[in-house]
Image (spheres, grey):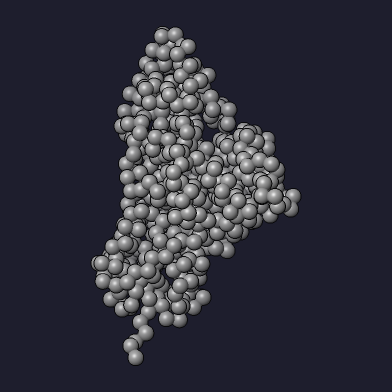
Amino acid sequence: MPEDRPSLVVILGDQLSPGMTSLSSADKHRDVVLMCEVEEETSYVGHHKQKIAFILSAMRHFAGELEEAGWTVDYIRLDDKANSGSFTGEVERAIKRHEPDRIVITDAGEYRVQEMVDGWSQTFEIDVDCLPDKRFICSKSEFEDWAEGRKSLRMEYFYREMRKKTGLLMTQADKPAGGEWNYDKENRKPAGDDLFLPKRQRFEPDRITAEVIEMVGEKFANNFGTLEEFGWAVTRQDAEKAFEHFLGAAAGDFGTYQDAMLEGQPFLWHSLISPYLNVGLLDPLDVCRQVAEAYEDGKIPLNSAEGFIRQILGWREYVRGIYWREMPDYRERNAMRAQRDLPWFYWSGETDMACLKAAIGQTRDHAYAHHIQRLMITGTFALIYGVEPRQVHEWYLAVYIDAFEWVELPNTLGMSQFGDGGILGSKPYAASGAYIDRMSNYCDNCAYDVKKRTEDDACPFNSLYWDFVARHEKTLKGNPRMGRIYSNWERMDEETQKALRKRAKEVIEGMG
C-alpha cells in the first residue's frame, strides 16, 4: 500500500479560528499545519508597531491552541535564521520537510495573497485545495448574485437582505424590529465630558506578547506608532472577555454616541473588537447574535443593537463584497483626479489643527481611531486637500490595527476619498469645520477659529471645503445630493469666493 502522506494545512495570519474550513477538512492525527511569520507581510507597507505585535502574538498563541488540541504545527518565526521572508518560500521549504500530497488552505482575505496562493499548484506541481472562508455571512458568489444588474450598489438594501437571511432583529412577521430598518438618525448625538464614560478593558501583555513586543521594538524601530500602550487581546479567551465587557459596560450607549468625539477619550463606547473579528479571534455572526439577544432581553436599546449589527452584518460584509467584485484595478482608481502628496503631519502628528492632532495622536498611541475620526477628520481633510487616494489608502492600511486591504481599501478609497466615483457613497464626504465642532470638543482649544473662513487664523477645513466644491463643480454639480451645496456657493458674492479660494491656496502652500 502507498504511504499515507500528510496534507500541508496553511494557516494565514488572519485565519486564527479553529473553525477554518482548511482545518475542518484536515486530519489532525496525520496532517501538518504550517504557520509562518514572513518579512513580506510585515513590510509591504510600514505597519504600526502595535499592528505587527498584535498579529504575531495572536498567531503564536493560536499555534499553541492548535497544539493543545492535538495538531502538529510547523511554526516559522520572523527571526528564524532560515526564514525565506515570503509565504511561497516557506511553503516550498515545508514541502521539502513534510512531503505532503496536497496543500489545503482557506481563501485569502487579500487579493495579492490569493494571487500568490493561486500560483502554488503550478509552482510546486502539487494539488492545492483552496476552500471558501465561511466566517463571512455572505459568500462572494452570493454578493455577485445580489449585485448583478443593479444600477447602484447601496449598502442599505444589501443590509436588509442580510437581516432577512439571518433573522437578526426581525419579527416573526419578517418585519424589522421596531418597524424601521435603520436607526441612524438616533445615533448622531455629541458627547459631553460630564457623561459617564466606561473604562475599557485592556490586557497586560503575557510572556509571549512581551517577547513579541521586544522583537518588534528592535526590528521595526522606525515604523509608525508606539508600543507602550499595547493592551489588545491576543487570545480567543481574552477577545471574548473584551466583547463581554463592551456588551455589559458600553453597548447601551454605543448607538447614541457612536459618532461623537472627545479630546483625550480614544475609545468612548465603541466595541474595539474589529481587530479580533478580522483575524478570527471572534466570530461576526456570533457577536451579532449576542447583541440581538441583549436587545431582546431588554439590556440594551434598539438603536444601539441595530447600529452595532449594521456595522458588521451590513457594512463589513458589504465592503468585502465590493472589494472582491472590483479588484484588481480598484486600488488604482482616482475619480476626483487628486494628485497631492499626503501631508507629513499624518506621520508626525505635528499640526496645530486640534482635531487632526488628536486623531493622529491616538492612532500613534493605540493603532486605533473610530470610524468618524477616520471618515470625517483624517479622511475628510485628505479629500478636500486633494491627496492622491492611493497614498491615503496606504496610510490607513499601515496605521490601524484592524486594517486588512479587503476592508480598508473600499472604506478609504471608496467611502472616504470618493475615488471609485460613487460605488460606495452617493456623494463625497466633504465637510467644513462645522461638522467637527458639532460632534466633538476639539475646536474648543484649537489654534484655529472654526467660525472663521478666510482670516489667517480661520479653520483650514472651511476654506479647503469650499475650494473642493469649486474645483470639482463640473464633476459634482449634477449630483442630486450636492445641489444645495452648489446653490450656497453660487449665492456667495465673487469677492467671498475669491477670498475662500485664496485662503485655501495659502493653506495648501503652507503644507508644502
Looking at the image, residue 321 lies above or below residue 434: below
The residue at the point 31 percent across, 60 percent down is: 116
Residue at the outermost bottom position: 1
x then y, percent, for residue 74: 38, 73
Using the image as rendered, state which of residue 326 and residue 53 is in the foreground: 326
Query: Does the rendering let one see residue 192?
Result: yes
457 lies left or right of 296? left
Q: Quadrant of the C terminus?
A: top left
The residue at the point 50 percent across, 40 percent down is: 154
The residue at the point 58 percent across, 28 percent down is: 438
Using the image as rendered, state which of residue 379 and residue 478 is in the foreground: 478
The residue at the point 38 percent across, 42 percent down is: 393
Task: Please tell me in which quadrant of the rendered image residue 115 appears.
Answer: bottom left
Query: Does the rendering let one see residue 349?
Result: no
298 lies left or right of 357? right
x then y, percent, for residue 441: 57, 30
x then y, percent, for residue 291: 65, 52
Using the image as rendered, state which of residue 238 and residue 278 is in the foreground: 278
Looking at the image, residue 112 lies above or below residue 347: below
Residue at the outermost right position: 298
x then y, percent, for residue 437: 55, 27
